[in-house]
Image (tube, grey):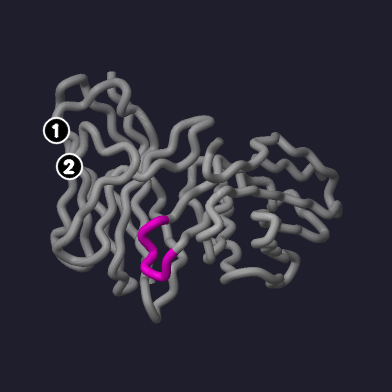
């Protein structure tokens, strides 16, 4: 079993839809959780960062962490064609930034 | 604020050639990383440097060497390139302790080894 699992997609949705992206993980020591967006032929850019369990909202984006289920989610409301990208989850077990583990990414297409 | 800058953006090498990928960050981060990204494989850590003067192997270090030249710069060297090293390479940096742990990435180097 991989340390972080993520459905690779591709996921296609119509413009305006609510998108749910998910990752599961096996290491209960993970405490720091991140979502990155990667456009084609670009570097990943940090979208959301959360510590421990709970929700965090930023505009149209909401990140949820359920440590008891080892499950994290990213919700995108009112999705736009500009949201079409690959979304990577990442997590770490320390406050020293050395042990990031990335999911393989989910490719999202938002159709106009 | 440039963030993380990588050079070059593209490179084609012949098998057996050597090259160095350069990375610099201006965020005063302690930690720096080199990843490779291959289709279906996600990001895999090659080497990282937790602080100036230290480097450690990641998941896929074979065929690579690194140098943490100073706090800002972290280079990746391929001594004898192989076709299996064809990939997109990303440099990243992060703070630690009070600086936060999220990683910031450069724009990548697309390397083809023929």
Question: Along the horizontal axis of the image, is A2 left or right of B104?
Answer: right
For the residue labelled by badge 1, is the local secondary structure a helix, a strand or a loop? loop
Magenta segment: does it hold A97? yes
Question: Along the horizontal axis of the image, is A66 left or right of A13?
Answer: left
In the image, B113 versus B1, the foreground residue is B113
- The magenta span reads A94-99
Q: Pinpoint residue A64: horizontal percent, then vertical percent.
A: 70, 64
The image shows residue B38, relative to residue A14, as above or below, that is above
Subunit that carries the residue with mark 2 = B
Question: Along the horizontal axis of the image, is B46 left or right of B37?
Answer: left
In the image, A36 versus B1, the foreground residue is A36
When asked about the image quadrant of residue A13, the answer is top right
Q: Pinpoint residue A21: horizontal percent, then vertical percent.
A: 71, 50
Quadrant (top left, top right, bottom left, bottom right) of the N terminus of chain B: bottom left
Q: Which residue position is annotated with label 1?
A: B79
Q: Which residue position is annotated with label 2?
A: B65
Count all numbered tags in the image, as a single digit.
2
Subunit that carries the residue with mark 1 = B
Question: What type of secondary structure mainly makes up the magenta span?
Answer: loop
Residue beneath the point at 50% across and 52% down? A44
CB within 8 Å, label 2 to label 1? yes
Q: Residues within 10 Å of mark 2 (few under 14, many from 20)?
A: some
Asked whether residue B81 appears in the rendered view, the answer is: yes
Residue beneath the point at 49% across and 39% down? B42
Residue beneath the point at 70% across and 34% down? A10
């Amino acid at each position: 079993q991989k340390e972080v699992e993520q459905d690779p997609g591709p996921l296609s949705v119509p413009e305006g839809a609510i998108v749910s992206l998910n990752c599961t993980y096996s290491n209960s020591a993970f405490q720091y959780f991140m979502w990155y967006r990667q456009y084609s032929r670009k570097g990943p850019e940090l979208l959301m960062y959360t510590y421990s369990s709970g929700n965090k909202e930023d505009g149209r984006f909401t990140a949820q962490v359920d440590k008891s289920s080892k499950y994290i989610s990213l919700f995108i409301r009112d999705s736009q064609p500009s949201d079409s990208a690959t979304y990577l989850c990442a997590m770490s077990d320390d406050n020293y930034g050395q042990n990031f583990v990335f999911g393989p990414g989910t490719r999202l297409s938002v159709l106009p | 604020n440039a963030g993380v800058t990588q050079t070059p953006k593209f490179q084609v090498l012949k098998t057996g050639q050597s090259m160095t990928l350069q990375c610099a960050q201006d965020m005063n981060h302690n930690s720096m990383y080199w990843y490779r990204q291959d289709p279906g494989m996600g990001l895999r850590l090659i080497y990282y440097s937790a602080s100036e003067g230290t480097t450690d192997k990641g998941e896929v270090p074979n065929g690579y060497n690194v140098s943490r030249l100073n706090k800002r710069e972290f280079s990746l060297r391929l001594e004898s390139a192989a076709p299996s090293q064809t990939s997109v390479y990303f440099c990243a940096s992060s703070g630690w302790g009070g600086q936060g742990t999220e990683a910031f990435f450069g724009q990548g180097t697309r390397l083809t080894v023929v």
